[in-house]
Amino acid sequence: MGRIFEKRKASIFKTSAQKSKLFSKYGRQLYMAAKNGVPDPDANPTLRAIVEKAKRDNVANHVIDKAIQKAAGAGGEDFQSMRYEGFGPGGSLIIVDCLTDNPTRTISDLRTCFNKSDSKLSANGSVVMSFDHLAVLSFQGDNEEKVIEAMFAADVDVEEVEFEDGTMTIFAPPAEFFKAKSALLEAFPGLELEIQEITFIPQSTTTLSGENLVSFEKLQTMLNDCDDVQEIYHNVSLPS
């Protein structure tokens, strides 16, 4: 497939928010994971994965602890996971994942972002079909044979293993994420995963220029300013 994730992540995937925004996003994700499972990372793989990712992004421990403790209490907020799709400037493709306690507010905010940037929201399924939804695990290494053996022994349904410039990347169905990660860590004790997430990878990319690029960057900025927006995926190859 020729999709070395490490080479594309900086130009293709989601953009970073400011620290306070980042803390807010992780707070919601941690809360939802703890609320929908158990508020204990050791007994909740989904929560544990988010905690690990939050720490890699330098989210303060008190933010993590507060979100988990909040989920452990009675009552609390009622967030819903919502996914929106749309067409951006120059025919670009965009997926926006949200956590919201008010879907009416969220769709209104997103519609404003799209309308003000020469873009439009589309029906569910119209954009996501042009992306691969995959678990991605990437790390420094060169023993491709041992990696494949580890995946086979753990009965992991791997879609592809790629090796380039000293980096190995495993692509697997989302449901295989935790099994693949566990198999890797068992086969390679002490292994440090540079990338470990479930994401959307575009099947093809597009390059924008001029007004289309300006409008696309405006859309990204506006979306990142929306409190409910958690992740933004697109197929635009941005200038480095």
Image (spheres, rainbow, N blue to C red):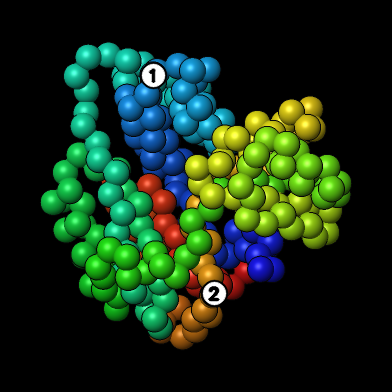
Residue at which label 2 appears: 204
Q: Nearer the viewer, residue 174 or 205?
A: 174
Q: Look at the numbered discs 2 and 1 and tell me whether their residues touch, using CB distance below 8 Å.
A: no
Residue at x 21% of width, y 28% of height: 77
Q: Position of residue 55 (x, y in %)?
A: 56, 31
Mark number displayed over residue 137? none
CA–CA distance between discs 2 and 1? 38 Å
Q: Is residue 79 visible?
A: yes
- The amino acid pointed to by label 2 is Ser
> Image quadrant of residue 27?
top left
Q: Position of residue 208 (x, y in %)?
A: 49, 81
Above or below 24: residue 116: below
**Left or right placement of residue 89 versus residue 192 in this view:** left
Above or below 193: residue 62: above
Q: Position of residue 79 (x, y in %)?
A: 24, 36
Above or below 62: residue 214: below
Which is nearer the N-term, disc 2 or disc 1? 1
**Left or right placement of residue 21 versus residue 109 in this view:** right
Residue at which label 1 appears: 38
Residue at x 23% of width, y 72% of height: 115
Q: Quadrant of the N terminus?
A: bottom right
- The amino acid pointed to by label 1 is Val
Q: Position of residue 162 (x, y in %)?
A: 74, 58
Residue at x 54% of width, y 74% of height: 204
Q: How many marks?
A: 2
